[in-house]
Image (cartoon, rainbow, N blue to C red):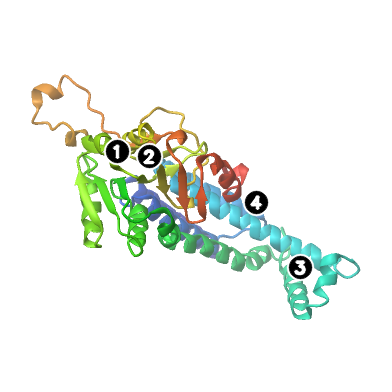
């Protein structure tokens, strides 16, 4: 009865988030990632499993359900992959500890020789290994839950690490902002990105500079960005999107946000980003992208220049009051642009700065190959 109760509770939590994602009640890369981690933490804490494969399958099934609910929010799948990667790491560490405990009696090695000078650490290591040996026994017929009991505490810590990374991502991205922005520079950005906003506000503590914000029609999120930066004491100029190319010759640097970073180093970003990046390339102006590593997505853009195939309401481009014209044209209002890797000079992440050509290496470090397809 208890098992069924936990299973029903888990299903209810997952279905609740899937419903919110489907209805767009939870939007934005960071918000969806945070909600996903919280759901996975609850699922793992209540899950019953007697070996690592069962746990991985539980998490994958949750991931598939959430990704199917909203395929356009790439950070949902990324977060599931990240949690799976951490879980496997913790499992391998624990099982290696078991092997070490059973083989450490008669084995001579350099590491044991070094530890002889550190008795406290040696005792702690042997104690941990002995604990692991005592608790980590997969498929135990006498006590099927022993494996889960032994592994869950470290799994909770691993999931908490992912949560902490998401909660501190803005601070970690913007901590070196003063090294990228210099005094009296003119910076161009487009739309409202919380990461870019935190980055610019951090740099403003050390440098005086001017930010040109494109208003990003038809959503006009640039208005909110300009208001926020101006209230923080940053010299801000709001311009229409059509002025980007004309102003680019005066701009020192273009700073963009990202919705998702793809495996080839390209990215999905708010509509207008491709316009800004193309103008910057024509004027040899550097383009840097502020983003958290949780947006790294092991996928390629196999579609077309509309990128994520996410379209906004066409009536904001051409209203229905233009009745005669609406019947004669198809109105497309893509929400994201696909920006190719050659248009980007650097990604500023919460784990340092990287060129687009090294994104594949970050993917290898962040995710396991078998999780690319959930």
Q: In this figure, which residue is indicated by the disc labeled 3?
A: 133
Q: In this figure, which residue is indicated by the disc labeled 2?
A: 285
- Is 46 rendered above or below residue 318? below
Q: In this figure, which residue is indicated by the disc labeled 1?
A: 248
Q: Secondary structure at mark 4?
A: helix
Q: Is residue 310 left or right of residue 315?
A: right
Q: Is residue 163 left or right of residue 245?
A: right
Q: Residues within 10 Å of mark 1 (few under 14, many from 20)?
A: many
Q: x and y percent of residue 145 in the render?
A: 65, 64
Q: Is residue 147 left or right of residue 45?
A: right
The alpha-carbon separation of the residues under discs 2 and 1 comes to 8 Å
Q: Are marks 2 and 1 in contact (CB under 8 Å)?
A: yes
Q: Secondary structure at mark 1?
A: helix
**In the rendered image, which quarter is residue 168 located in?**
bottom left
The alpha-carbon separation of the residues under discs 3 and 1 comes to 63 Å
Q: Are marks 4 and 1 in contact (CB under 8 Å)?
A: no
Residue sitting at 23 percent across and 56 percent down?
Answer: 235
Labels 4, 1: front one:
1
Q: Residues within 10 Å of mark 2 (few under 14, many from 20)?
A: some
Q: Earlier in the sequence, mark 2 or mark 1?
A: 1
Res 283 seen here: yes
Q: Nearer the viewer, residue 303 or 179?
A: 179
Residue sitting at 46 percent across and 37 percent down?
Answer: 266
Labels 3, 1: front one:
1
The alpha-carbon separation of the residues under discs 2 and 3 comes to 58 Å
The alpha-carbon separation of the residues under discs 2 and 4 comes to 49 Å
Q: Is residue 208 left or right of residue 43?
A: left
Mark identifier at residue 53 = 4
Identify the residue at the far front of this view: 184
């Amino acid at each position: 009865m208890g098992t069924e109760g936990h299973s029903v509770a888990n299903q209810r939590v997952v279905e609740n988030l899937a419903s919110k994602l489907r209805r767009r009640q939870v939007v934005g890369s960071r918000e969806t990632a945070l909600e996903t981690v919280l759901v996975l933490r609850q699922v793992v804490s209540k899950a019953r499993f007697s070996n690592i494969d069962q746990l991985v399958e539980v998490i994958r099934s949750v991931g598939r359900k959430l990704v199917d609910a909203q395929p356009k929010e790439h950070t949902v799948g990324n977060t599931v992959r990240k949690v799976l990667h951490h879980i496997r790491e913790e499992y391998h560490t624990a099982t290696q500890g078991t092997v070490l405990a059973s083989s450490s009696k008669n084995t001579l090695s350099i590491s044991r020789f070094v530890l002889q000078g550190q008795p406290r650490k040696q005792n702690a290591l042997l104690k941990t290994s002995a604990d692991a040996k005592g608790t980590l026994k997969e498929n135990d017929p006498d006590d099927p839950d022993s494996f889960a009991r032994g592994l869950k505490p470290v799994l909770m810590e691993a999931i908490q690490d992912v949560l902490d990374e998401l909660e501190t991502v803005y601070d970690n991205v913007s901590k070196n902002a003063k090294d990228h922005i210099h005094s009296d520079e003119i910076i161009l950005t487009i739309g409202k990105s919380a990461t870019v906003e935190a980055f610019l506000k951090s740099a403003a503590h050390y440098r005086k500079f001017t930010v040109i914000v494109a208003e990003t029609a038809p959503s006009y999120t640039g208005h909110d960005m300009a208001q926020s930066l101006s209230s923080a004491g940053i010299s801000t100029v709001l311009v229409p999107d059509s002025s980007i190319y004309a102003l680019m010759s005066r701009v020192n640097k273009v700073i963009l946000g990202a919705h998702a970073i793809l495996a080839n180093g390209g990215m999905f970003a708010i509509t207008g980003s491709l316009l800004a990046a193309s103008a910057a390339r024509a004027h040899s102006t550097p383009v840097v992208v502020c983003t958290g590593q949780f947006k790294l997505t092991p996928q390629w853009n196999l579609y077309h220049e509309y990128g994520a195939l996410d379209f906004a309401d066409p009536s904001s481009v051409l209203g229905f009051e233009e009745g005669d014209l609406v019947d004669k044209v198809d109105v497309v209002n893509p929400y994201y642009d696909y920006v190719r890797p050659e248009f980007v000079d650097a990604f500023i992440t919460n784990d340092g700065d990287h060129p687009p050509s090294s994104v594949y290496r970050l993917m290898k470090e962040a995710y396991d190959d078998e999780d690319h397809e959930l």
